Image (cartoon, rainbow, N blue to C red):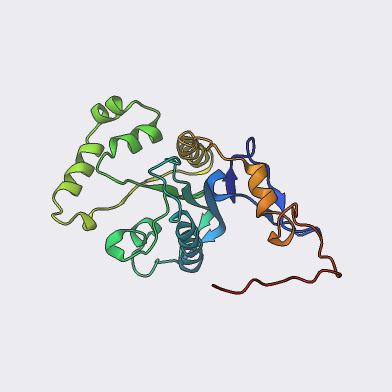
Amino acid sequence: MLIYDALNCPSWTLDNVGDPRRLIPLHAVIGVIEVKSTLDDITLKDAVGKLAEFDALTAQIDYEGPYPARPFRHVFAYRLDPAADFEGWATPERRLTRYAGTHCQPDGVFVLDDGFAVLDYGNGVARSFALHRGMTVDEARRGDWDIENEVIRRSVEMDPSYCNDYFSTAATNGLLLLAFLTFVLESAARFVPPEIDYADAFCRWGGPELGGLLDFRSPPNPDFPPFSLPEV
């Protein structure tokens, strides 16, 4: 599932023969969501592989410059396979940690009948607790020892790669959907529409069979065959 800036960038069909695929410039993408019916070893690996391909595309854009909002990448599943051991790591969020050797880390993994895990780039876990519990960060810090215990557990590891990269918690049904929507909206709020003339871009490179919507060149004249200039 692709979330993009539909207000400023309408999608265009790939060709004129009913192909349902659409063309959307990468600059207009707000985020991607890999949706799976059941999350197990195979489907998690497939989702991570597709997100890695998306990361390879976004790596070509300088998100530190005019496009500061890097697209979010989430995995959403309706159920968790109780028999899955995720290559011996027991849970998907542990399999996706750096010390497990993952090559791509989704920003979040949400499973409707189990819970969710969101990637914590630093040790500021209070924000994750606060979002889930409907509190301010200060209220979450004062609430109980959960946050302090998590910070202590991360601090005792000398090598940062051995920190648990994900904050995870149990949540199902409506609470899970609310958490999912919260993190999606939080990421989408950072998106700033770039100053790009999408109509011009589509006319030049997008459109039917990637040949452009318009061809500004004149049709070839059979009376005047093309002439190649000699190389200097």
Viewer-proximal residue, 225 or 53? 225
Relative side of 204 to 34, left or right? right
Q: Is residue 11 left or right of residue 145?
A: right
Q: Is residue 100 above or below residue 136?
A: below
Which residue is nearer to you in this view: 227 or 151?
A: 227
Residue at image position (15%, 53%) is 157
Is residue 14 depicted above or below 148 in this figure? below
Residue drawn at (51%, 62%) of the image: 50
Asked if residue 29 can be seen in this view, the reply is no
Quadrant housing residue 218: bottom right
Give coordinates of residue 163: x percent, y percent.
Answer: 23, 53
Residue at the outermost right position: 223
At 40% across and 29% down in the image, what residue appears? 134
* Residue found at x 24% / y 32%: 144
When the figure is inspected, residue 17 is found, relative to residue 114, above or below; the finding is below
Where is residue 106? Give x, y as percent: 42, 54
Check the image and name the residue furthest to the bottom: 230
Q: Quadrant location of the C terminus?
A: bottom right
Q: Which x, y percent locates residue 74? A: 48, 50
The answer to whether 200 appears left or right of 142 in the picture is right
- Residue 211, quarter of picture: bottom right
Observer able to see residue 84: yes
Report the front residue among 100 and 77: 100
| Image mark count | 0
User: Which of these two is toward me, 213 or 17?
Assistant: 213
Residue 100 location (% of width, % of height): 30, 65
